[in-house]
Amino acid sequence: MRASGYQTTQWAVTVPVSDPAGDPLLGTQPLSYAPFFVERNDGRTDSFVRVATLTDLIRIPHAELQYFDVLGPGGDAIFVVNPSTSVLGPFAGDILRIPEASINGALSYWLESDAPYTNGDFVVDGLATRASGTGPILLANNRLQLPGYTFTPNDVNRWIVLGGFSNSLYNVAVQVISYVGSTAVINLTTASGTFTGGTWTMPVIRIVTNTDPALEPRYFPTREPNIGWELRRGAALIGSADYGGVPSRWVTDPVLPLTRSTRFTSLETTPTASKAAMQVVQNGVMNLQAAAELNNTDLTPLITSTYGP
């Protein structure tokens, strides 16, 4: 609800939450339509702001949904390919696999599943750099300082690649366990004294969103914590974890990320307003159902319906 009328709602055709054999075809039941939401991101918490408008979809590019953060175990296995030179992986062409049972036992509601996207395999485009700098400082008691950088709650459990230390044991990927201001506690045992390195990098995995312009982009459609993952290079398993992966937005507007979800809660000021909002959504879904093709092949990926002034 808005002061001057009803919200414009962007409904995206997606797969049903439950999709066993015998279910209605794609686009023929309410659960196969999922609204885009704009949410405010405060640390690791997303709070609903509004249902997305066309202006939001123009402002917030889908490209921001093509990143994957390793916030659990495994970053030390995949981010430093050659510890002596700090060559970073993963590489373009690697496969980031999201196992089918890694989110609450199933991923059918989270992943695109129309051909050719019939599995949880994402092609790696390479690494992006969330943040980087020079002169990392290691202190006693497993502490790390990054000159000019102040840690935030988002950095807890992230991996940082260190390079340029005279002791090669320190040219590794380290994980942030906790922090106070500009000093982090990491998972690397450090000797007494102060040691200064050459560079530091916070890497994040970037996936290929589209290999065929005729296809819908292959991006992460929503934010989920603690996803299991595998990184594969050809037939070789490079690294894996049962938890800790997070589809990561590369937020151009730091407080207004875009989320596609089947869950929506609206708190209205009066019972009348609440019933009106419910009726508008119900009518919108019925109209979309009536307009949808039933052959599962000729569906418009984004349908816009505006209600109210």
Image (cartoon, rainbow, N blue to C red):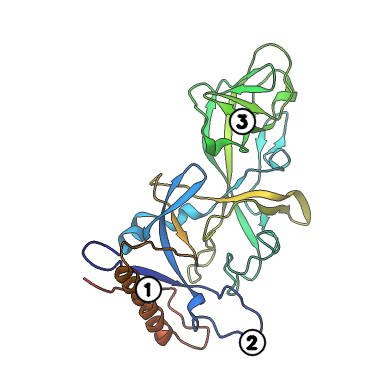
Contact flag, marks 3 and 1 (Cβ < 8 Å): no
Q: Position of residue 36 (x, y in %)?
A: 42, 64
Q: Is residue 301 left or right of residue 115?
A: left
Circle on res. 183: none
Q: Label 2's element?
A: loop
Vertical comparison of 116 with 64: above or below? below
Badge 2 density bin: few <14, some 14–19, many ≥20, Cα 10 Å: few
Residue type at mark 2 is Gly
Lower position in the chain sequence, tag 2 or tag 3: 2
Amino acid type, callout 1: Met
Q: Earlier in the sequence, mark 1 or mark 2?
A: 2
Q: Quadrant of the N terminus?
A: bottom left
Q: Which residue is mark 1?
A: 278
Q: Earlier in the sequence, mark 3 or mark 1?
A: 3
Mark 3 neighbour density, 10 Å: few (under 14) some (14–19) many (20 or more): some
**What residue lies at 66% left-to-right and 42% top-to-bottom?**
89
How far apart marks 2 and 3 lie (CA) works out to 49 Å
Kindly state the secondary structure of the residue where label 3 is placed: strand
Q: Which residue is mark 3?
A: 178
- How far apart marks 3 and 1 lie (CA) works out to 44 Å
Depth check, mark 3 against mark 1: the one in front is 1
Q: Position of residue 88 (x, y in %)?
A: 65, 38
Query: How far, Cα to Cα, is label 1 from label 2?
Result: 29 Å
